[in-house]
Image: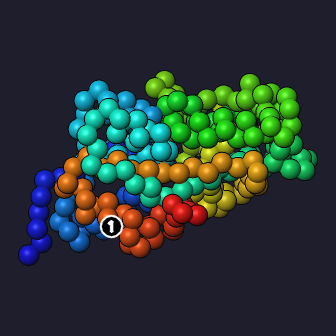
Amino acid sequence: MIKTQPPLRIFAAGSLRRAFVPWLESYRQRTGTDVIVDFGPAGLLRQRIEQGEKVDLFASANTQHPVALSQQQAVAELRLFAANRLCLTARRERVAEYDSWLDILRAPELALATSTPGSDPGGDYAQQLFDYVERFHPGEGQRIREKARHLVGGRQSVIVPSGQIAAGWLILQGMTDLFIGYQSNSQPLREDTRLQLFDIPEPYNVRADYMLARFSQSACELVNELCSEVGQSYLRQQGFLPPSA
């Protein structure tokens, strides 16, 4: 007989949606435990926890937010569970004449968008990328930073329709020519011939370490599965890296 328990409540970074939805549905079917998930920018989710909302698990796209929460309130466990990288998505017809991803970023005539720093780790990682460009090409990183618009991931941001990836949707809506986002979204974006994706090489790319904060004992089994081969396989299928990579 399948054991039942009250639903688990999770806050999870929006970039985890495509991996977490099928994994958690499988978990529910196998264990009988329902899981209620709110996906969103990790910085805004952290603020909701700080303001008193109760969750069993917080899965963040960075380490800073879980660590900060652990310094404010009781956290049963902190654990790295995945990693990610950045990539550049562009409208194909706008970038045919450029030689490299960096030439594309530097082009003043191409509109660039990122997520919102502070509210969404994706925006923070884009700022780190600009820092690395500035380190190797003084003045260039700052110029790129100044032209970048923060279109998603903030309190007053554009609402991306459910099921859409921000990078592709914003570009195809004509809101930007370029978007710096997560490499884990690259597979479905590459399937659209109107888009072109560019890998960002070392030493410019940023490693995004994903960390969880477990608040309750009831989420222990769920966390263990996420970090096991079962959970990791769902993440791997969606382009995430293992936490040690």
Residue 180 at x, y percent in the picture: 67, 43
- Quarter-wise, where is residue 241 in the image? bottom right
Q: In this view, does 217 lie to the left or right of 163?
A: left
When the figure is inspected, residue 53 is found, relative to residue 208, above or below; the finding is above
Q: Which SS class for mark 1?
A: helix
Tell me the residue at 66%/48% (across/down).
206
Tell me the residue at 12%/72% (across/down).
2
Residue 179 at x, y percent in the picture: 67, 41
- Quarter-wise, where is residue 240 in the image? bottom right
Q: In this view, does 166 lie to the left or right of 135?
A: left
Residue 176 at x, y percent in the picture: 69, 35
The outermost residue toward the bottom is 1
| Numbered marks: total | 1
The outermost residue toward the left is 1
Tell me the residue at 84%/40% (across/down).
136
Tell me the residue at 23%/69% (across/down).
29
Q: Amino acid type of disc 1?
A: Glu
When the figure is inspected, residue 134 is found, relative to residue 202, above or below; the finding is above
Q: Mark 1 points at which residue?
A: 225
Colouring method of the image: rainbow
User: Which class describes the residues within 10 Å of circle 1: few (<14), some (14-19), or many (20+)?
Assistant: some
